[in-house]
Image: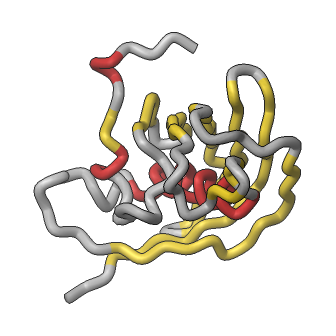
Amino acid sequence: MEIKEENIINIHNFLPHREPMLMADYILELTPEKVITSFEIKEDNVFVHDHKFVEAGLVENLAQTCSSILGQSFFENPDADTKVIGFITNIKKIEIFALPEVGNKIISKASLISQFENICNIFCETFINDELLIRAEINLFIQEVKP
């Protein structure tokens, strides 16, 4: 996958997460139905154990990747002080094939299956190069929090 730097989007524009719980660095592609993100695994990550990014980290990376599809409607204006809450409501199916190591850059791809208001069903996968690490179908809920 060839990535042009001018097409990279800062994930902060579409997610409320911040360090140490931010598990995606950049959005490489974003449409209303699809998203691709990148994330470099660093030694100080809360989900790194014995030099590997553990299962919970892979799931959190997928959830954040997926939520940017739904979250883009809440964060259309990056200067607005929008506050949202979101969470996984269901994991229908999950398969974990391998764990990435510190220094690896993972690419996560998600496609919207269905959406009803603020609830969506999304299929997602994460790779290192062509190696599939995790595949899942999850449901997410996102809602704006009013002050």
- Within the image, what quadrant is residue 106 found in? top right
- Give the image location of residue 120, x and y in percent: 60, 62
Q: Check the image and report above or below for 19 versus 29.
A: below
Left or right of 51? Residue 76 is left
Q: Check the image and report above or below for 53 versus 125.
A: below
Q: Residue furthest front?
A: 50
Q: Name the residue at 55% across, 72% down.
A: 141
Image quadrant holding the C terminus, namely: bottom left
Left or right of 52? Residue 15 is left
Name the colour scheme.
Answer: secondary structure
Left or right of 69? Residue 4 is left
Q: Check the image and report above or below for 27 versus 55.
A: above
In front here: 21 or 115?
A: 21
Q: Check the image and report above or below for 66 versus 133.
A: below
Q: Name the residue at 51% across, 11% down.
A: 2
Q: Name the residue at 77% across, 66% down.
A: 91
Q: How many marks?
A: 0
Q: Name the residue at 86% across, 59% down.
A: 93
- Give the image location of residue 11, x and y in percent: 36, 46
Q: Residue furthest bottom?
A: 147
Kindly tell me whether residue 42 is visible in this rendering: yes
- Give the image location of residue 125, x and y in percent: 72, 41
Image quadrant holding the N terminus, namely: top right
Kindly tell me whether residue 121 is visible in this rendering: no
- Give the image location of residue 131, x and y in percent: 79, 27
